[in-house]
Image (cartoon, rainbow, N blue to C red):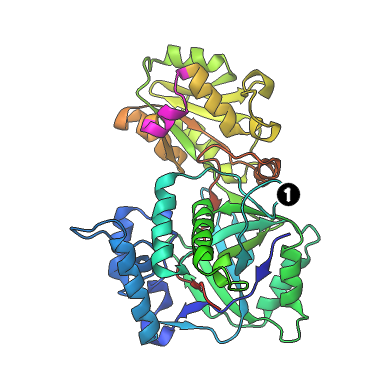
């Protein structure tokens, strides 16, 4: 089973940096270049200077990461970042509106350290996604230079009794948060510091035990996890005599699967079809789906705008080309799913669609990776790209979300999902706290 431990985080000192909402940022992998510039201008202490350091003319490999390490050292010296005096867990609450709807949700979890272990059968940590070499290398260079986790991996744990949710509610009921900000997406983020009980008994100890009772499934942050494993193995070669070193752990946000989790779909935009006529597209779709024409673009977009509230996993899609669109109902999975995949993967909507792209449109995985398929979270943007033939966009596929239980089933089976299968929302902010790989 997993090993979870409280820790002493580095946190911004509000007296030094001023408004805390000026120093936080989204995770590095969702920040676009224009937003990066805004964040850099927002504050000289914004966390992007550590989590997503900028390139400068003449930089060689690792230079920008080493600059981040120097910035971190300066911030620790001048009091910008201060280390908490006692090992703690950090209760985290996010209040948000589900995109495309007026539905409001609140989810709570907690930050702590998770002991690293390789992926494998019977392990305590389960992946569901393949990683890419370039992001892994980028995160590795940063971790090696700084020796800190600047943003968390997000892990899900099963706790069907609801006890963990009650503990988190109790811990936040009468205490003022140390952090309370509204981000650019109007998500409210609040953080409480809860020191571990000195006697080893109490709500923190119970909460950690509940989260560690079953394997942890990585929901977000596979690249960061694999990077941390590589870094751990490297450090072990030079510090083999150290007992229970801090580099054996990484920063994780733990969320119970009975929280009201939101998974957004990622819509696909297919580029440069050999024949983009409506007749050709309808004929190819008819080989895999029951096709129901949709007359108005707005009707199709409206049907998938609230996709985050749909159960997902039903084999239901939307399609839009320049002369029309359709609702698609997938045929039984046995007719389309690749035989070399496990049942949990075969039943995924994204797997079905991958088969359609390859068998129906001649777009295999290599071509997908090469840019023949684009991605967007917005159904409206997907169809607009097709209408404008932007970057060769010929056909949009609109999806429903992948259910959390389907993600868990894939992880438990030892399989991995296709790229862009899940987008857990909202993202955990970077800058709430930093995990130094030291005790």
Q: Secondary structure at mark 1?
A: loop
Q: Is residue 403 magenta?
A: no
Q: Residue furthest left?
A: 57
Q: From which residue to which does the magenta span run?
A: 361-371
Is residue 95 toward the left or the right of residue 73 in the image?
right
Does 344 appear above or below 240?
above
All told, the count of numbered labels is 1
Q: Nearer the viewer, residue 99 or 265?
A: 265
Residue at 56 percent of width and 68 percent of height: 240
- Residue 7 shows in this picture: yes
Q: Position of residue 210 (x, y in %)?
A: 76, 65
Q: Nearer the viewer, residue 347 or 284?
A: 347
Q: Position of residue 73 (x, y in %)?
A: 36, 78
Residue at 68 percent of width and 32 percent of height: 342
- Residue 45 shows in this picture: no
Residue at 78 percent of width and 62 percent of height: 162
The N terminus lies in quadrant: bottom right
Is residue 230 toward the left or the right of residue 146 in the image?
right
User: What secondary structure predominates along the stretch shown in magenta?
Assistant: helix
Q: Position of residue 359 (x, y in %)?
A: 52, 18
Quarter of the rendering containing residue 16: bottom left
Q: Position of residue 175 (x, y in %)?
A: 63, 83
Does 345 appear above or below 210?
above
Q: Which residue is mark 1?
A: 122
The C terminus lies in quadrant: bottom right
Q: Is residue 368 magenta?
A: yes
Q: Nearer the viewer, residue 229 or 39?
A: 229
Quarter of the rendering containing residue 340: top right
Q: Residue furthest right?
A: 161
The crowding category of the residue bearing disc 1, from other C-alpha atoms within 10 Å (few below 14, some 14 to 19, many at least 20), is few
Does 316 appear above or below 45?
above
Residue at 70 percent of width and 31 percent of height: 343
């Amino acid at each position: 089973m997993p090993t979870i431990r409280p820790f002493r985080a580095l946190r911004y000192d509000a007296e030094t940096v001023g408004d805390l909402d000026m120093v936080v940022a989204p995770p590095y992998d969702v920040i676009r270049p224009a937003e990066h510039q805004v964040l850099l201008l927002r504050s000289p202490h914004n966390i992007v200077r550590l989590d997503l350091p900028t390139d400068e003319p003449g930089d060689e490999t690792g230079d920008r990461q080493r600059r981040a390490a120097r910035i971190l050292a300066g911030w620790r010296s001048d009091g910008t970042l201060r280390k908490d005096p006692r090992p703690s867990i950090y209760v985290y609450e996010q209040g948000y509106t589900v995109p495309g709807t007026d539905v409001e949700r609140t989810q709570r979890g907690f930050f702590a350290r998770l002991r690293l272990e390789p992926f494998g059968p019977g392990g305590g940590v389960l992946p569901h996604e393949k990683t890419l070499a370039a992001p892994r290398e980028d995160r590795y260079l940063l971790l090696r230079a700084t020796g800190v986790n600047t943003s968390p991996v997000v892990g899900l744990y099963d706790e069907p009794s609801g006890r963990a949710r009650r503990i988190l509610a109790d811990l936040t009921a009468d205490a003022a948060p140390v952090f309370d900000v509204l981000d650019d997406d109007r998500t409210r983020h609040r953080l409480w510091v809860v020191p571990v009980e000195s006697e080893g008994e109490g709500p923190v100890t119970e909460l950690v035990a509940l989260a560690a009772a079953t394997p942890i499934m990585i929901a977000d942050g596979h690249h960061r996890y694999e990077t941390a494993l590589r870094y751990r193995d490297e450090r072990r070669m030079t510090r083999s005599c150290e007992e229970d070193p801090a580099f054996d752990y990484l920063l994780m946000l733990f969320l119970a699967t009975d929280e009201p989790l939101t998974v957004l779909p990622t819509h696909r935009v297919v580029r440069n079809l050999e024949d983009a006529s409506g007749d050709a597209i309808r004929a190819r779709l008819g080989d895999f789906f029951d096709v129901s024409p949709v007359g108005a673009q707005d009707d199709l977009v409206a049907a998938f705008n609230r996709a985050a509230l749909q159960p997902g996993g039903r084999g239901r899609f939307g399609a839009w080309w320049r002369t029309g669109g359709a609702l698609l109902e997938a045929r039984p999975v046995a007719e389309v799913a690749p035989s070399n995949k496990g049942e949990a993967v075969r039943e995924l909507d994204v797997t079905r669609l991958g088969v359609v792209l390859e068998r129906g449109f001649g777009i295999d995985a290599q071509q997908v990776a090469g840019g023949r398929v684009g991605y967007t979270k917005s159904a409206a943007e997907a169809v607009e790209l097709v209408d404008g033939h932007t970057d060769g966009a010929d056909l949009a596929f609109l999806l429903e979300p992948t259910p959390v239980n389907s993600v868990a089933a894939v992880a438990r089976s030892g399989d991995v999902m296709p790229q862009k299968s899940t987008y857990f929302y909202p993202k955990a902010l970077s800058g709430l706290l930093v995990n130094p790989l030291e005790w």
